[in-house]
Amino acid sequence: MPTRENQSAAANFYATFGNMSRIGRKPIEIPKGVTASLAGNKVEFKGPKGSLSIDVKHPITVKLDGATMTVERPDDSSGSRSLHGLTRALLGNMVDGVSKGFEKKLLITGVGYRATLDGKRLSMALGFSHPVHIEPMDGISFEVSKTQTEITIKGVDKALVGQVAANIRKLKESEPYKGKGIRYEDEVIRRKAGKSVSGGK
């Protein structure tokens, strides 16, 4: 008789791959202003925000019919189902990226902590003995709010935008006592009470 742990693991397995299968079967609609091309296993999208391409991994195949793209798998093995959903998700993100773009916002907290733009370069004062300078990668741009406490990372590649935001956040992660540092816009910092000092007689 299967144990409760095994039943739970099996349920999670089928739920995960069931979701991936549903994602994989969903057609991708190419919006106006975006062009898609297919050459062998290479898929490329071009839009108002830029261009992206990907080499689709075997055994997944992609078909393009007018303004509709579909992703197919050869069988129902766990590997094919997982890769099917992943490929569909990546292609969908690429369409969104070249048509609308992605962005990630970071908030800076702390007395004297601020960000500025020097041309396209991001400069930050984070309590170190020197400012921190970051040159944008290809396909990435920075924006800084008038208060100099909010940084917006923009780009067509969702994964790259997220990675750049994570790298900047790591420079000075928000500490839990006063909340000083860099955090995501929607990130909640679990605050800790500082140690109280009691004087003795």
Image (cartoon, rainbow, N blue to C red):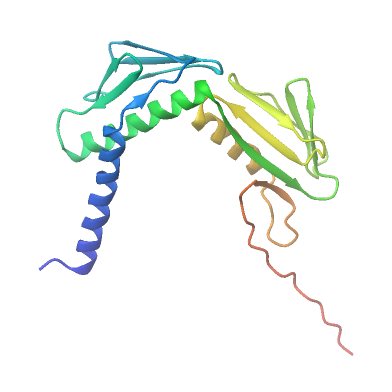
Q: Is residue 125 above or below residue 1?
A: above
**Quadrant location, the N terminus:** bottom left
Q: Is residue 90 above or below residue 129?
A: above
Can see residue 56?
no
In percent of width and height, residue 123 lies at 77, 31
Q: Give 88 or 13, whichever is nearer the viewer.
A: 88
Could you tell me which residue is drawn at 27 percent across and 26 percent down? Answer: 71
Residue at (85, 45) in percent of width and height:
112
- Give the image location of residue 157, x and y in percent: 51, 26
Residue 70 shows in this picture: yes
Left or right placement of residue 14 versus residue 122 in this view: left
The residue at the point 29 percent across, 15 percent down is: 65
Residue extending farthest to the right is 201
Position of 27 with respect to 74 (left or right) is: right
Percent position (x, y) of residue 144?
75, 33
Quarter of the picture containing the C terminus is: bottom right
Q: Nearer the viewer, residue 185 or 32?
A: 32
Q: Is residue 32 above or below residue 191?
A: above
| Residue farthest along the bottom direction in this orientation | 201
User: Splitting the image into 4 quarters, where does residue 116 fall?
Assistant: top right
196 sits to left or right of 41: right
| Total marks placed | 0
- Compared with 100, 112 (above or below) is below
Residue most toward the left? 1
Q: Position of residue 46 (x, y in %)?
A: 47, 13
In screen coordinates, is 143 left or right of 41?
A: right
**Residue at the front extreme?**
32
* Residue toward you, 23 or 201: 23
